[in-house]
Structures are given as C-alpha cells and as structure tokens.
Image: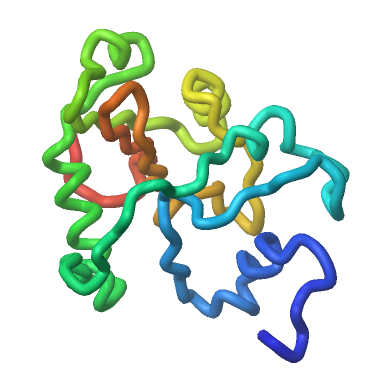
C-alpha cells in the first residue's frame, strides 16, 4: 500500500476491500495517539463529539509477559472473541444500566442496519461505517468498556449459536 498511500482519510483507505484483501489490523483499544485539534482534512467532523475525548494510554504494558497467542492467527482471535461473547451475559439497552458493574461482561445484540443507531447513541459511539465496516468492529463485534464493565455489541451474523 506504500506506493498508493491515501493523501487524506487513511483510515477509510485501509478499510477498502482492495487494500484489506480480507486481512485485519491489530489495534490497541486504548489509543497510543490522539487528535489534538479540530483542523485537518476532515474539517473537525467528529472532533467535538468523539475525537476530543480520546484518552492516551497511561498504563504500562509489559509486552514481553503478555499472552498474545490470541493474535497468532485469525482463527485464534475469532475463537477467543467467540468465547468472550458466549461467556458474556446477554442483555439489552433497557437493562444494561442495572447489570453494569466493575468486572461484568455483557453482550448486546443489535440489528445491523436498523438498530445500531439506538445502541450507538446510548453508549456515545460513532455512527459511521466505511466499506461496510463499523469503527472498532471485527465481524460486526464492537467491544468497549463502559461503567467499569466490558460490553460486546454484536449482530446475529457472527458467531453462530448464541442465544
């Protein structure tokens, strides 16, 4: 991709099917970078509502000691993520406040085209989708931390067998 790198909107460029070629990017959930101003190629499109709230990582990570086997292959990561979804308590946006608490793991299924906006609004998530991929999603699963608990938003499409 180096020889045809995007002049602007590199994140959208990286989502294009001809660039991804069915590959996925490993990215930290706590950003190692942040946007420090509202001016740029996007003209501050999401700065006030989302980007200004990005927090830099302030926790030291011992990568030598970290167990990264779930990142060794796509199948290992998918198995790990599917297990997290199976183990999480199923809930909905009406009950999530009651179930949320330090250390809880919750999952909320949403209907991709019609229900995502309601769920995204509840948690303050970005609504945009580029090349059929929602921000921070993998196979339609969007993991995030909210009120001290782990929440997994997911569609009915993946993984199979969730009830």
* Quadrant for the C terminus in the image: top left
- Residue 46 is situated, as x and y percent measured from the top left of the image, at 73, 37
| 15 sits left or right of 67 in the view | right
Residue at 73% of width from left, 29% of height from top?
A: 48
* Quadrant for the N terminus in the image: bottom right
Extreme-left residue of the structure:
87
- The residue lying toward the viewer, choosing from 34 and 101, is 34
- The residue lying toward the viewer, choosing from 98 and 140, is 98
- Residue 71 is situated, as x and y percent measured from the top left of the image, at 27, 71
- Residue 107 is situated, as x and y percent measured from the top left of the image, at 27, 32
Residue at 21% of width from left, 73% of height from top?
A: 64
Q: Quadrant of residue 121?
A: top right
Q: Quadrant of residue 20?
A: bottom right
Extreme-bottom residue of the structure:
3
In this picture, is 37 found above or below 21? above
- Residue 75 is situated, as x and y percent measured from the top left of the image, at 24, 71
Number of callouts: 0
Residue at 16% of width from left, 69% of height from top?
A: 65
Residue at 26% of width from left, 51% of height from top?
A: 159
Q: How is the image coloured?
A: rainbow
| 105 sits left or right of 109 in the view | left
In this picture, is 60 found above or below 87? below
| 153 sits left or right of 49 in the view | left
| 106 sits left or right of 118 in the view | left
């Amino acid at each position: 991709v180096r020889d045809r790198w995007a002049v602007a909107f590199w994140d959208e460029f990286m989502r294009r099917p001809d660039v991804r070629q069915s590959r996925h990017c490993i990215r930290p959930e706590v950003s190692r970078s942040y946007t420090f101003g509202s001016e740029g190629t996007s003209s501050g499109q999401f700065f006030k509502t989302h980007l200004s709230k990005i927090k830099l990582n302030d926790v030291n990570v011992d990568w030598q000691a970290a167990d990264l086997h779930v990142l060794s292959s796509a199948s290992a990561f998918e198995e790990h993520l599917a297990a997290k979804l199976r183990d999480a308590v199923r809930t909905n946006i009406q009950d999530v406040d009651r179930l949320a608490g330090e250390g809880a793991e919750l999952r909320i299924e949403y209907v991709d085209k019609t229900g995502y906006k309601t769920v995204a609004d509840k948690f303050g998530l970005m609504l945009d989708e580029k090349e059929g991929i929602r921000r921070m999603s993998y196979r339609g699963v969007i993991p995030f931390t909210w009120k001290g608990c782990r929440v997994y938003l997911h569609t009915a499409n993946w993984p199979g067998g969730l009830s």
